[in-house]
Image (cartoon, rainbow, N blue to C red):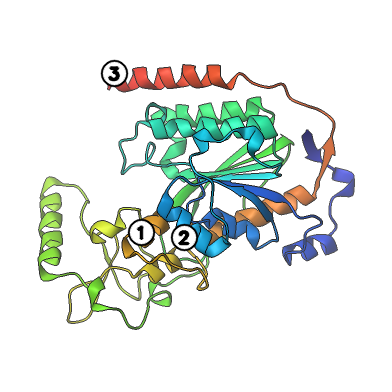
């Protein structure tokens, strides 16, 4: 079913004000793919959306998700039939970023994880939801000279979606972290959509730091010396790798990643008369904008992995508001787009990506 803006009956100022106070005309049904610990979900739950399905293959993330939302996500999305997923209005998916990230091998669609987008497309093609929201690393849009993004956009547009993409930074939405991510929004039909304007809220790292921290988060002498030695070696080689250190007055940190549990080198906190320390799991949660009520996993290692893999919740909340306001402006019309031959497209694009990798 296609959608278009109803210009004659757009919401008046009073109604839009009411919506901005989180009162929607209807409760939209949402599914959460590659759900992680539900960072995307939090942004939509704030506005009363109903979640009818979630999928996440990592067993540790599943436990944290269940701990907070009282439901355990289904497992491997490649093993789930689209017809077995309940009807829904909005699809959320923060699909694996490693194939496209600067820190990864950057194989893109030549990486098995990179092909998981086609499972998202398979579900979209079957259900044709009103809206899709995808999240990935900033590099996704420029990977392979922009060809990877073109594949995704062309497939979604071929299904009848209007596609919008924007790179947004968490530090512009009130959390002290320099985290740039691309968000791809698709509306089923010819729809005008505008991403939220970053409020540019002033941030300070000290606002999320705990006053008292267990000694176990402080770097040992050996680890701290190792960090300093490796940074000096990188400087001699002329690159900028090595640890990054911040204090309570820092406006923001660098990006927290799923590898933070290893040695915390990307974000170290300065301490007076002591070695620097790592963030605590609660501070890592705050750095991503998770609420204080969010229950942490029992393992510090898993906490760092899960928050490092998640999203900045305030960014998602701002996008969710704009998506839902746009949905409230829409009317349904009786027009259907033809199904696409997704398997054929998948085989062609993966083969092309593999050929390119062999040439490198």
What is the secondary structure assignment of the residue under circle 1?
A: helix
Name the quarter where the N terminus is drawn.
Answer: top right
User: Which residue corresponds to the image point at 51% horizontal and 63% vertical from the top-left?
Assistant: 67
Mark positioned earlier in the residue sequence (1 or 3)? 1
Alpha carbons under labels 1 and 3: distance apart: 37 Å
Does the rendering let one see residue 317? no
Alpha carbons under labels 3 and 2: distance apart: 42 Å
Determine whether, in the image, residue 302 is placed left or right of residue 327.
left
> Percent x, y for residue 20?
73, 63
Q: Which residue is mark 2?
A: 64
Name the quarter where the C terminus is drawn.
Answer: top left
Q: Which residue is mark 3?
A: 359
Alpha carbons under labels 2 and 1: distance apart: 9 Å
Q: Are marks 2 and 1 in contact (CB under 8 Å)?
A: yes
72 vs 235, nearest the viewer: 72
Mark positioned earlier in the residue sequence (2 or 1)? 2
Relative to 59, say whether 338 is above or below: above
Does the rendering let one see residue 357? yes
54 vs 251, nearest the viewer: 54
> Percent x, y for residue 146?
45, 30
| Mark closer to the observer (3, 2) | 2
Q: Quadrant of residue 247?
A: bottom left
Determine whether, in the image, residue 218 is placed left or right of residue 83.
left
Relative to 82, say whether 294 is above or below: below
> Percent x, y for residue 137?
43, 44
Which circle marks residue 302 in the picture? 1
Relative to 163, say whether 244 is above or below: below
User: Which residue corresponds to the image point at 50% horizontal and 68% vertical from the top-left?
Assistant: 294
């Amino acid at each position: 079913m296609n959608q278009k803006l109803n210009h004659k009956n757009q919401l008046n100022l009073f109604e839009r004000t009411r919506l901005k106070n989180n009162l929607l005309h209807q409760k939209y049904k949402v599914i959460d793919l590659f759900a992680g610990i539900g960072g995307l979900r939090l942004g939509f739950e704030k506005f009363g959306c109903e979640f009818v399905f979630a999928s996440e293959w990592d067993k540790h993330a599943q436990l944290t998700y269940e701990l907070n939302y009282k439901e355990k996500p289904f497992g491997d999305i490649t093993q789930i039939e689209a017809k077995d997923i309940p009807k829904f209005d909005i699809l959320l998916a923060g699909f694996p970023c490693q194939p496209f990230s600067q820190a990864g091998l950057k194989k893109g669609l030549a990486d098995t994880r990179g092909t998981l987008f086609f499972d998202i497309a398979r579900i979209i093609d079957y259900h044709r939801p009103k809206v899709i929201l995808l999240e990935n690393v900033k590099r996704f849009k420029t990977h392979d000279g922009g060809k990877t993004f073109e594949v995704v956009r062309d497939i979604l547009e071929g299904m009848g979606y209007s596609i919008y993409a924007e790179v947004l930074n968490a530090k512009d939405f009130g959390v002290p972290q320099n985290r740039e991510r691309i968000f791809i929004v698709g509306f089923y039909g010819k729809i005008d959509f505008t991403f939220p304007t970053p409020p540019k809220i002033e941030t300070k790292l000290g606002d999320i730091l705990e006053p008292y921290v267990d000694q176990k988060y402080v770097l040992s002498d050996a680890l701290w010396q190792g960090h300093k030695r490796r940074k000096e070696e990188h400087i001699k080689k002329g690159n900028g790798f090595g640890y990054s250190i911040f204090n309570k007055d820092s406006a923001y940190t660098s990006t927290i990643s799923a590898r933070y549990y290893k040695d915390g080198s990307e974000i170290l906190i300065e301490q007076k008369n002591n070695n620097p320390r790592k963030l605590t799991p609660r501070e890592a949660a705050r750095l991503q904008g998770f609420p204080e009520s969010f229950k942490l996993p029992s393992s510090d290692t898993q906490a760092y992995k899960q928050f490092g893999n998640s999203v900045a919740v305030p960014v998602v909340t701002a996008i969710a508001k704009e998506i839902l306001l746009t949905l409230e402006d829409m009317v349904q019309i009786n027009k259907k787009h033809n199904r696409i031959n997704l398997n054929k497209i998948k085989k062609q694009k993966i083969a092309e990506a593999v050929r390119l990798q062999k040439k490198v």
